[in-house]
């Protein structure tokens, strides 16, 4: 059983992403912002973070950095999903510790396959 | 036709301006091949475009000038000032013809003899004999020989900038012949022009690899100067690259690259990687696995590699081979249609089967990205490796569903590389031969730079009125947005809905933010560098100083500083006046200068410096300076100041008197600077643009005029206040303070109302009187707005203070335009019109 944490302030987006990544052998956790994500991750082992960039309280960049500096979470792959398609936004995401960067709106099939690939089998 | 002609004239004027600027610089600092080349290209463009129209005299003159420059460029003709003057004359002539073309008053028959005459003079400098033609043919060949090594070296050194990674290694395997290396050294001031060099490089066509080299900066280095050096490697035609870099001409060198050169460059790295892979203790296991195929004795290779979190190299090596050195067609072509699920259902076994497996595009992308992360500058193993290794492990485990497959894949990769080694050695051996042929191609390419650069002129030109219109709309949007808070208030007070009010306010903050970004974006469009105006001045200084027999050097700094276009244009006149003033009155004649122990050549500095939202423009000369005592006396004689002021004002204040109306230091009107525009006119123009001007001077040392100007003129901050239940505004810049004083504190001196604030006497003006309202007697307390004017501080008695707001000020139009009491109007959020008072005018009627 793998756990994917979807961090996005828009509930619609969370719902959509949850729909895409859900499967029998996956659990999906949701968080509205970086702070909530970190709090929820304390109790649950996470296998993959799907992180939005623009969020209140703690944005995606900060969250990435926090995850990478957190002893328990540092090894968890992060896919960043942002509305910004500019190269420098992707670069910033990578600098902050994201493993992969995708642009919103994500293509359903790509998200599915990328998530499957990262989690190692669907 | 006429539209095309307009475009042609517009473009050519820019060429003319840039050419004459370069010519002036050459006259000042001697010819350089860069500059000659630039002028040549400018004239070449004019000539080429003019061919489209039937204006033969112009084409012919431009052609003659171009030919002369070509000879100068080829070093057949030595450049001298005579040539420079003649070229300038030709440029002027062309410019005049453009005027006529624009006005439709051209008479080609009249042009003909001028063109022939000037053309002949130009051509007289070129050796017309056949021998001359021969040398032109020989020169490129000679250059080719001498520069062969240079080009090899330059490509090699450009390539050195790269850490040869997967992408580059991959390129060496691609069949593409359109490879390039570009060395891009952005202009130091590029940030001030809003350029983003890194983005420019990232957007290069077919970009494959790219390195930024930023030298260590000294503590006192100017952080706003760009010191980056960017090297990029890509796969695209030279034309495409040149087009992309059109705006950065002269800031980059482009090298064409061949497979051999690239392979040669990569050889060490590839061999290194192989060696490293062989050396790594961890990879002994991999080798054993390869040799024996014994999967039981080993963990999953992926797992093993992934487990070694201490060193990134193994995983990097595997990734690098997987994504590049393995023949990628194998990865793409042999992937089964069904994807990884199918492969799991029908696990392949043995080395022969592995070819059926491979990476899906998104898997490859994921892996490539991880590799890029590991290769990126600032990669920290501690920070990134754990997640990368898990991710890679997952992807690999999934794709190569049993270890044997993975091992085979890595095997194949290794073998592939091993096979490459003899090939690489071949390349090494034949390097000299290939280098030669390669440089020849490079040379051929290089010999047509003019052609490539010609097509690089690409710019979106927009009619200014369109941008002004856009600005107007943005202005209205700003006003419309201001109505939201009113609405929120109304919702709360009348509708009684706090929730609605809160929502409106929330929306307001969004709209407000968007409007602000929109506004600043539009303002950005209107920004142009001051060089737009500055570049006219070297010519002016040169012409004037020649006329006056003075030697003057004009040094300009900060030409990249950006300004609102309207503002810049309104500045052009006053700056010319100030420059003329410095040339005419400031700088002494060479004899006087030598006598005074100064260098013979005078120096005028024209400096633009950005400061927050403003720009400081300084015009500094090292001339004779101005004596404040003389100014004081003159001012007294002319009735600008009174006798008592004569004694009370200090030197600095005295200097500022030259800006007073009715004052001119020059006793006789000179041909140059005495054109009836006094310093007061300069000051008026500067204040109309919302700026201030002051002057500093030291006798014998020089004078400095300092202009402080807002960068944009569109948005004003005004302070609102109420008189007789009507709202008025006054520019926030003028407001010094607001005070409330009891009536008895207002004193009368010589029939004037005055107020003493902190021992300072402030004359008062009752706005009720000044604006023609009924007096409002019997108030116990007065609200007084203290404003600053060039004449000192004054107090305006008003009824009530309100807040300050940002408005787009519009000038008064129609009948209202005659009311000088008001400088303009602005629309408030609730639809009311705010009259903005002109403090100076109001005070002059009041006092």
Image: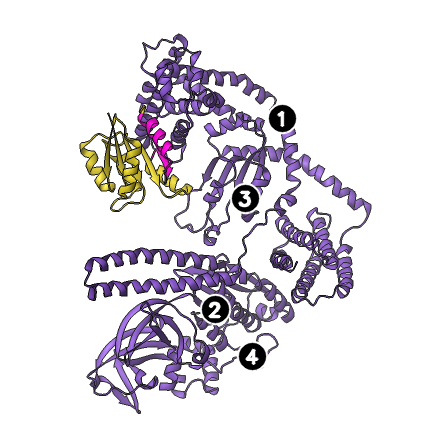
Q: Which residue is mark 4?
A: B676
Which chain contains the residue that carries disc 1? B
Instruction: Looking at this view, name the residue that lies furthest to the front.
Output: B495
Mark sitting earlier along the chain (3/4): 3
Q: Secondary structure at mark 1?
A: helix
Quadrant in the picture for the N terminus of chain B: bottom right
Quadrant in the picture for the C terminus of chain B: bottom left
Mark sitting earlier along the chain (1/4): 1
Q: Which residue is mark 2?
A: B704
Mark sitting earlier along the chain (2/4): 4
Q: Which residue is mark 3?
A: B244
Disc 3 to disc 4, how far (Cα)? 49 Å
Display colour for chain B: purple
Q: Nearer the viewer, residue A33 or A16?
A: A16
Q: Which residues are magenta?
A: A97-119
Residue B701, above or below B350: below
- What letter labels the chain drawn in yellow? A
Mark sitting earlier along the chain (1/2): 1
Q: Secondary structure at mark 4?
A: loop
Relative horizontal placement of residue A54, taking residue B163 as reference (left or right): left
Disc 2 to disc 4, how far (Cα)? 22 Å
Q: Closer to us: mark 1 or mark 3?
A: 3
Q: Which residue is mark 1?
A: B434
């Amino acid at each position: 059983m793998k756990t994917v944490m979807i961090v996005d302030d828009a509930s619609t987006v969370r719902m959509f992403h949850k729909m895409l990544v859900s499967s029998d052998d996956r659990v999906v956790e949701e968080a509205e912002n970086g702070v909530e994500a970190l709090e929820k991750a304390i109790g649950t082992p996470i296998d993959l973070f799907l992180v939005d960039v623009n969020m209140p309280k703690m944005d995606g960049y900060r969250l990435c950095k926090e995850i990478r500096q957190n002893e328990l979470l540092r090894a968890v792959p992060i896919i960043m999903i942002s509305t910004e398609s500019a190269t420098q936004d992707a670069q910033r995401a990578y600098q902050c510790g994201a493993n992969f960067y995708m642009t919103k709106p994500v293509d359903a099939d790509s998200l599915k396959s990328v998530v499957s690939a990262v989690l190692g089998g669907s | 036709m006429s539209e095309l002609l307009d475009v042609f004239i517009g473009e050519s004027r820019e060429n003319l301006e840039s050419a004459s600027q370069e010519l002036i610089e050459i006259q000042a600092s001697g010819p350089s091949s860069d500059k000659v080349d630039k002028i040549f290209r400018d004239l070449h463009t004019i000539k080429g475009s003019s061919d489209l129209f039937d204006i033969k005299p112009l084409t012919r003159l431009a052609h003659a000038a171009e030919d002369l420059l070509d000879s100068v460029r080829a070093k057949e003709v030595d450049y001298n000032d005579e040539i420079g003057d003649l070229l300038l004359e030709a440029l002027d002539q062309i410019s005049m013809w453009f005027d006529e073309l624009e006005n439709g008053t051209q008479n080609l028959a009249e042009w003909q003899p001028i063109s022939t005459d000037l053309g002949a003079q130009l051509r007289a400098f070129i050796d017309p004999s056949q021998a001359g033609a021969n040398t032109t043919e020989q020169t490129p060949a000679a250059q080719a020989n001498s520069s062969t090594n240079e080009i090899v070296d330059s490509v090699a050194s450009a390539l050195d900038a790269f850490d040869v990674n997967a992408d580059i290694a991959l390129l060496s395997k691609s069949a593409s012949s359109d490879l390039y290396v570009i060395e891009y050294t952005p202009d130091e001031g590029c940030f001030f022009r809003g350029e983003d060099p890194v983005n420019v490089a990232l957007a290069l066509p077919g970009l494959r690899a790219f390195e930024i080299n930023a030298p260590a900066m000294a503590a006192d280095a100017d952080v706003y100067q760009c010191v980056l050096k960017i090297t990029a490697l890509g796969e695209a035609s030279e034309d495409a690259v040149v087009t992309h870099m059109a705006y950065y001409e002269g800031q980059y060198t482009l090298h064409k690259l061949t497979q051999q050169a690239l392979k040669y460059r990569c050889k060490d790295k590839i061999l290194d990687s192989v060696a490293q892979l062989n050396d790594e203790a961890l990879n002994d296991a991999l080798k054993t696995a390869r040799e024996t195929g014994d999967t039981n004795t080993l963990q999953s290779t992926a797992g093993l590699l992934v487990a070694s979190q201490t060193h990134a190299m193994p995983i990097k090596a595997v990734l690098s081979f997987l994504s590049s050195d393995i023949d990628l067609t194998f990865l793409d072509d042999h992937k089964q249609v069904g994807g990884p699920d199918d492969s799991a259902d029908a696990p392949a076994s043995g080395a022969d089967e592995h070819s059926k497996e491979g990476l899906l595009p998104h898997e490859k992308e994921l892996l490539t990205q991880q590799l890029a992360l590991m290769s990126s500058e600032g990669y920290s193993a501690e920070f990134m490796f754990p997640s990368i290794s898990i991710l890679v492990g997952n992807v690999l485990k999934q794709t190569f569903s049993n270890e044997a497959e993975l091992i085979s894949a890595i095997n194949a990769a290794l073998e592939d590389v091993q096979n490459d080694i003899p090939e690489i050695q071949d390349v090494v051996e034949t390097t000299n031969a290939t280098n030669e042929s390669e440089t020849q191609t490079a040379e051929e390419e290089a010999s047509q730079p003019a052609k490539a650069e010609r097509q690089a002129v690409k710019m979106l030109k927009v009619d200014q009125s369109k941008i002004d219109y856009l600005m107007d709309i943005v202005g209205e949007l700003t006003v419309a947005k201001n109505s939201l808070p009113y609405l929120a208030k109304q919702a709360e007070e009348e509708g009684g809905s706090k929730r609605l009010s809160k929502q409106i306010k929330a929306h307001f903050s969004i709209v407000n933010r968007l409007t602000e970004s929109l506004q600043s974006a539009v303002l950005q469009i209107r920004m142009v560098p001051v060089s737009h105006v500055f570049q006219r001045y070297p010519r002016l200084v040169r012409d004037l100083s020649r006329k006056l027999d003075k030697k003057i050097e004009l040094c300009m700094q900060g030409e990249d500083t950006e300004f609102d276009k309207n503002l810049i244009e309104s500045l052009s006149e006053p700056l010319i006046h100030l420059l003329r003033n410095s040339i005419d009155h400031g700088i002494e004649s060479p004899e006087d200068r030598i006598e005074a122990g100064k260098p013979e050549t005078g120096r005028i500095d024209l400096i633009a410096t950005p400061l927050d939202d403003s720009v400081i423009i300084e015009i500094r000369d090292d001339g004779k300076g101005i004596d404040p005592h003389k100014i004081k006396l003159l001012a007294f004689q002319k009735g600008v100041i009174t006798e008592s002021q004569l004694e009370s004002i200090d030197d600095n204040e005295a200097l500022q008197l030259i800006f007073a109306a009715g004052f001119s230091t020059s006793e006789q009107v000179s041909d140059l600077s005495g054109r009836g525009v006094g310093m007061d006119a300069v000051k008026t123009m500067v204040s109309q643009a919302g700026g201030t001007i002051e002057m500093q001077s030291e006798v014998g040392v020089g004078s400095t005029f300092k202009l402080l100007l807002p960068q944009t003129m569109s948005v004003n901050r005004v302070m609102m206040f109420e008189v007789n239940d009507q709202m008025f505004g006054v520019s926030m810049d003028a407001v010094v303070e607001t005070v409330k004083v009891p009536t008895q504190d207002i004193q009368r001196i010589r029939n004037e109302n005055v107020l003493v604030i902190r021992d300072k006497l402030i004359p008062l003006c009752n706005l009720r009187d000044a604006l023609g309202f009924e007096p409002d007697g019997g108030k116990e307390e007065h609200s007084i707005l203290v404003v600053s004017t060039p004449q000192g501080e004054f107090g305006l008695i008003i009824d009530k203070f309100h807040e300050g707001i940002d408005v787009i000020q519009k000038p008064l139009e129609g009948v209202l335009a005659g009311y000088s009491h008001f400088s303009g109007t602005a629309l408030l959020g609730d639809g009311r019109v705010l009259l903005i008072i002109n403090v100076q005018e109001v005070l002059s009627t009041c006092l």
